[in-house]
């Protein structure tokens, strides 16, 4: 059975719209449940109500991101008929849904899959899925720092001073600063202040995710979702140029 999650549904929608059929009606694609829609047929599944709602959310987010758009050519339902955009075709070809996917893939391709896995776990409904999601999100942060700020290059920075409390002399803050400077370039004082706050957010989020991953008590879905969102906000601040979506 296909892995039904927000990311996989987005790619499935893009694939359906890029298949050469031209524009498609939103509910011919997603269906209202009476019969299988094009999306269900392409995935080889029949959606339950939760999955259909997730498909609608995926559709709406693709439209908001400019990866699909209404054609406005139908007189009765001008906004319901949609087509894939050039940006959508590019996202499909690269398997990258947004700028953060692109930034992570430039560091290491597996980071995109770790990010996707974290969100997939949240929506999977599998036993212990929330703990898995928390673990995946923490792994995303740790591997981004490790792969994006290698020891040799970091230690060559003119500002680098070994931290006595760290066994290697390198702290996570060192790695975050290196990433900020090499991925975003020179920053103004105000930008550096915002970057410092984002770095703190990454560190705090990392600790929160560790606590969630190792907690024996039940993990609240909202807690895991909030920390994933916070981690992505911090990574965007560190890895992406100002104004990049």
Image: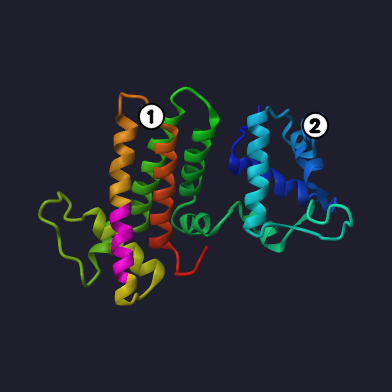
Q: Nearer the viewer, residue 116 or 46?
A: 46
Residue at 39% from the left image edge and 37% from the top image edge: 223
Q: Is residue 56 above or below residue 46?
A: below
Q: What residue is disc 2 on?
A: 36
Which residues, given as a range, are shown in magenta?
A: 192-201
Can residue 38 be seen here? The reply is yes
Can residue 92 be seen here? The reply is no
Mark 2 residue element: loop
In percent of width and height, residue 172 lies at 26, 54
Image mark for residue 31: none
In percent of width and height, residue 10 lies at 65, 46
* 2 and 1 marks in contact (CB < 8 Å): no
Residue at the right extreme of this rendering: 75
Label 2 Cα neighbours within 10 Å, binned few <14 / some 14-19 / many ≥20: some
Q: Is residue 236 left or right of residue 99?
A: left
Residue at 25% from the left image edge and 57% from the top image edge: 173
Residue at 38% from the left image edge and 52% from the top image edge: 144
Q: Quadrant of residue 187?
A: bottom left
In percent of width and height, residue 99 lies at 53, 60
Q: Is residue 7 left or right of residue 126?
A: right
Q: Is residue 104 above or below residue 224?
A: below
In percent of width and height, residue 224 lies at 41, 38
Q: Is residue 135 magenta?
A: no
> How far is the residue under mark 2 from the one under mark 1?
35 Å
Q: Is residue 55 left or right of residue 204?
A: right
Q: Earlier in the sequence, mark 2 or mark 1?
A: 2
Q: What residue is disc 1 on?
A: 219
């Amino acid at each position: 059975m296909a892995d039904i999650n927000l990311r996989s549904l987005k790619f499935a929608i893009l694939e359906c719209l890029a298949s050469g059929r031209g524009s498609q009606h939103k509910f011919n694609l997603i269906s209202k449940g009476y019969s299988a829609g094009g999306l269900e047929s392409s995935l080889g599944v029949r959606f339950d109500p939760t999955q259909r709602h997730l498909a609608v959310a995926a559709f709406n987010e693709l439209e908001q991101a400019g990866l699909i758009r209404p054609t406005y050519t139908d007189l009765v339902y001008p906004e319901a008929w949609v087509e894939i955009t050039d940006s959508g075709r590019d996202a499909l070809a690269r398997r990258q849904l947004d700028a953060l996917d692109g930034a992570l893939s430039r560091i290491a391709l597996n980071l995109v899959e770790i990010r996707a896995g974290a969100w997939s776990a949240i929506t999977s409904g599998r036993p212990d899925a929330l703990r898995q999601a928390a673990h995946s999100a923490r792994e995303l942060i740790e591997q981004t720092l490790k792969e994006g700020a290698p020891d040799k290059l970091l230690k060559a920075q003119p500002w680098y001073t070994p931290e006595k409390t760290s066994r290697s002399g390198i702290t996570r803050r060192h790695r975050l600063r290196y990433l900020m400077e090499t991925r975003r370039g020179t920053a103004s004082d105000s930008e550096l202040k915002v970057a410092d706050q984002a770095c703190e957010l990454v560190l705090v989020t990392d600790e929160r995710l560790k606590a969630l991953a190792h907690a024996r008590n039940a993990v609240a879905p909202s807690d895991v979702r909030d920390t994933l969102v916070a981690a992505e906000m911090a990574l965007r601040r560190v890895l992406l140029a100002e104004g990049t979506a």
